[in-house]
Each structure stands twice: as structure tokens, then as C-alpha cells.
Image: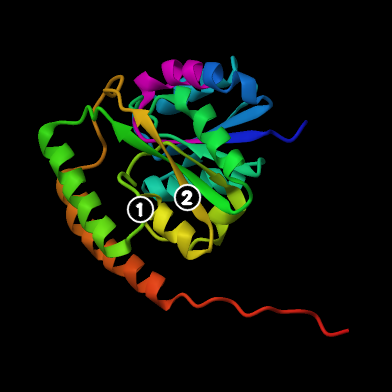
Amino acid sequence: MSVPRLSVVVPVKNEAGNIAGLLAEIAAACEDLAPFEVIYVDDGSTDGTAAALAAARTRHPWLRVLRHFRSGGQSAAVRSGVTAARSAIVATLDGDGQNDPAFIPALFSALEEAGEGAGLAQGQRVGRKDGRLKTLQSRIANGVRGRILKDATRDTGCGLKVFRRDVYRALPYFDALHRFMPALVVREGYTVVHRDVVDRPRFTGRSNYGLFDRLWVGLLDLAGVWWLIRRKRPAPPVHEVS
């Protein structure tokens, strides 16, 4: 089996109604990036997600499925997918349909064009389709994060990202890592490029993440990331003594 040029990781929890449609869009978007693989990580779903993915595997030979037998959260699901990925370049997107896979090629090209010094191409949503309360919360959180971490990223919560697998693997892992990737990628000495992506309403179902778990836990995570950045020291040059 040839090594894929791109691995697309999609974390899902109780998204049975969104599997088939999103997979068709991913296939169309990544056609010119072939060979590619798509890795769905079922994060402890209790609906028909497992059955929908099993049916999809019979139609799509490039689809791989991982399953958490209990939910570990979105960052854990992304981590499982990236760990299993066979490509040096990984794309992520949410499994609810709000992230349009049509933007993956533009993010992939942006990362390639930026060169080896770039570790992440980050999507930034325009035309948000979330409700007013959720959108306001996101704007406040992004504003506070940007002032404290100075990561030059307007929207770190967008699930559309393309990054180098080895850079991701070098990042300190914690729950909600996916929301702080730009600052942590810069911490490792890499640059981040940004591209606007158009937001959409979710296909079906409802969000698995609430207002207060993001807001209050996010403040604690922000303090932790700020500490990590301040404690980073450049590694000294090293060579083996012969």
C-alpha cells in the first residue's frame, strides 16, 4: 500500500446522520491530493455512528475507523487519529458538517508554500453559523486568548487545520490542545499561516459541547498554556562525541 500524501482525521461523537454526506465531500475535496486516507475516530458514540462508519468502509477503501470505547473528548480523539496517521501531513475537521472540506486543498497548499519552517495552516471561520450566545462566547474567548498568548490567530477553535505530523507529536498533550495549537506550534519554533474558511450550519443533530465547559475550563487551560510558553527555553546545540 502506498504512503498517503495526506491523512484526514475526523473526530466524531454521535454523528451518525452526518457520516455519509461529509465523507462524500471529503472525497471530492481531496481528489487532487491522492493518495489520501481518512481516519474517523469514534469517541465513544452511543447512537448509530459505528454502524454508519462500518457501512461507509464498504464503499471507501481509503477510510479507516478507530473507536474509543468510552469518550475521551475531542483532543483525545484527534490525538488517536494523528498517532495512527501514515502521512507526514495531517488535516483535521469537525464531524458535524460545519467545516467545509473544500478548504482542505487551500490549507494544504498554504502549508507547502510556507516551507519547512511552517508547522500549521490554521483555518479561520467567517460567516459563523452558531447561535448568538455561542458566537459571543467564542469572540470573547478568542480575544482574551489573543491578548495573553499573542498567537496572531483570530479563531483557534476552527477544526479545519493542516499541519505537520511530527510538529503535532512534539506538542505537550492535554485536553483542549486543539484549541491552543497556534501558540504551541510557535512555541516549538515554527510559523503558522492562516486562511479564511466559510462556516456552515451543522448537517444534523446537536453539538456535544456546552457553554460552561468551554468557558470555565478554557480559562484554566489558557493559564496553563501561558505558563508553558513562559517556561520554554531554546534547546542548546548538540553533537555526538566520536
Name the image quarter holding the N terminus: top right
Mark 2 Cα shell of 10 Å, populated few (<14), some (14-19), many (≥20): many
For mark 1, give the secondary structure: loop
The mark nearer the N terminus, 1 or 2, is 1
Q: Is residue 209 left or right of residue 44?
A: left
From where the camera sits, is residue 215 visible? Answer: yes
- Residue receiving disc 1: 152
Q: Compare residues 110 and 74 and report the one nearer the observer.
A: 110
Is 135 drawn above or below residue 225 in the view shown? above
Name the image quarter holding the C terminus: bottom right
**Marks 2 and 1: in contact by CB < 8 Å?**
yes
The residue segment tinted magenta is: 8-26
- Residue receiving disc 2: 192
Residue 117, x across and y down, in percent = 59, 54
Measured in 3D between alpha carbons, the distance from the residue under mark 1 to the one under mark 2, in whole angstroms, is 9 Å
For mark 2, give the secondary structure: strand
Q: In the rendered structure, which amino acid carries the disc numbered 1? A: Ala
From where the camera sits, is residue 66 visible? Answer: no
